[in-house]
Image: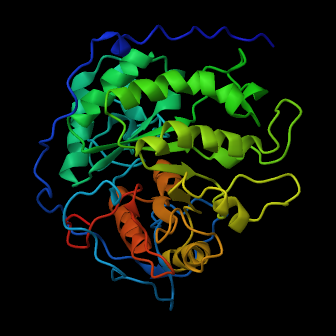
Amino acid sequence: MTRLVQAAARSNFWFGGHKKPLPPTSYPVWPQPARSPLPSIPSADIPDWSRHPSGTPGVWVQAGHTYDNVWPQLPPTQPELKWLRGDYFGVRVPGIPLLPNMAGYTVSSPPWNQNREPYCPPIMAMDVIRYYKAGMLDVVDEIMNAHIARSYTHFQLSIGHCNSFGLTIDQTVELAIRLRLKMRYLDCWFLGGNWGKYWDDGSQHEEMRDRDRDYWSPILLPWIQALRSNGVMSMACKGWQVDNCNTQSPRSNSKYPNPWLSITQFFAEEITAHNIPLGCHYINEAGMVLTDDGSISRQQAWKMKRGMVSHWHHQGDVYCPVDEYQARLVDSLKMFGDGSCGQYADGQPFQLVVCEHSAQSQFDLWCHENEATVKGLRLTQTHAATTSPGYSGSASQVDGTAA
């Protein structure tokens, strides 16, 4: 296979005295008017998953089971940076044109490819990058207006995908400014996409696997500095599903005994130290990057994050019933509440954000947006050793008002 040559991003003119104004201090009225009430969660036996459950809701509770449905602690009554309100995966925007290879566009035949109600595929936050790249700025604004109408205050910008889709640093900052003109808080995710590292057959290049800060620092630092210096990065996430291609075990290509810890320390120096909250996203329920031999427990892994990483965007089984999903969250949150993981800072436990609970089931059209929203609500209401600081995977109150 032949390596594709990655063109270097042009120098960042934002450092040359050409800064644009910072995002406004005045935003659309919050909360927005109530939307339609949420549906009830059906009680049923677990379907036969050996076949596609056509017409079967993708969100349910097992027959005879109960689940938490009141807030353990009421959400703040105003927008707050550290209480997330957003949907990074599945907002419907009827009528906008659909672009090839959209992350949430998994149906290529009518009527779904026409994006007319009620047949509207989910639009991911990541898809905004595609529209911006295509020069469809009116569509970018329409998508943001859909988030505003749901009283969301947080929006995700995947910096790795900005790079993978061909945006320069300048263009990425311009897009971030445009998003911040609409949305109070911008959550920038870094390790994701492929940072231009592909084989010519489109597959991911193994060069990025199990690397350390010496590899990632020269790649990421110009992007971080540009976003930071322009005041558009409200909070950050080290990356998507980082346990998929990183390690806490020694590697021959790294001088660090723990490559992933060195990456975390880099992010903390460039983001946390600048008073920007830093989180992460994992596939596994432990919320950690693994070792080859299991020599680091999840408690030890979180203790090493003290003062660096404050929260975890949780990903779970999208087909898991609500009652069982809550039970799993209780288990995950116990380690934050019992002190065995230490704390982010004295008196500040680590936190779990309800995140990817329905995305794939929406892409597969096994549940619609309102079902995902009520699932997000109930999961955020889980009574556990600590409380969730909001959701990045949709929610609202049952009556359609802001959560």
40 up-or-down from 277: above or below: below
Residue 33 makes an appearance in the image: yes
The reply, left or right, for residue 21 in relation to residue 104 is left
What residue is shown at x 57% (from left), y 72% (from top)?
Answer: 336
Where is residue 77 shown, x and y percent of the image?
19, 67
Q: In which quadrant of the rendered view does residue 210 lie? A: top right
Q: Residue 232 vs residue 299: left or right?
A: left
The residue shown at (24%, 42%) is 183
Q: Is residue 160 above or below residue 329?
A: above
User: For this view, does 390 lie left or right of residue 101?
Assistant: left
Observer able to see residue 245: no
- Residue 330 drawn above or below residue 249: below
Q: Nearer the viewer, residue 31 or 54?
A: 31
Q: Residue at x 51, y 36 (%)?
A: 270
**In terms of image quadrants, where is residue 31?**
bottom left
Which picture quadrant has residue 35?
bottom left
Foreground residue, 237 or 245? 237
Looking at the figure, which quarter contains the C terminus? bottom left
The colour scheme is: rainbow
Q: How far across and how far down the image is residue 221, in percent?
A: 53, 26
Percent from the top left, x then y, of residue 340?
65, 75
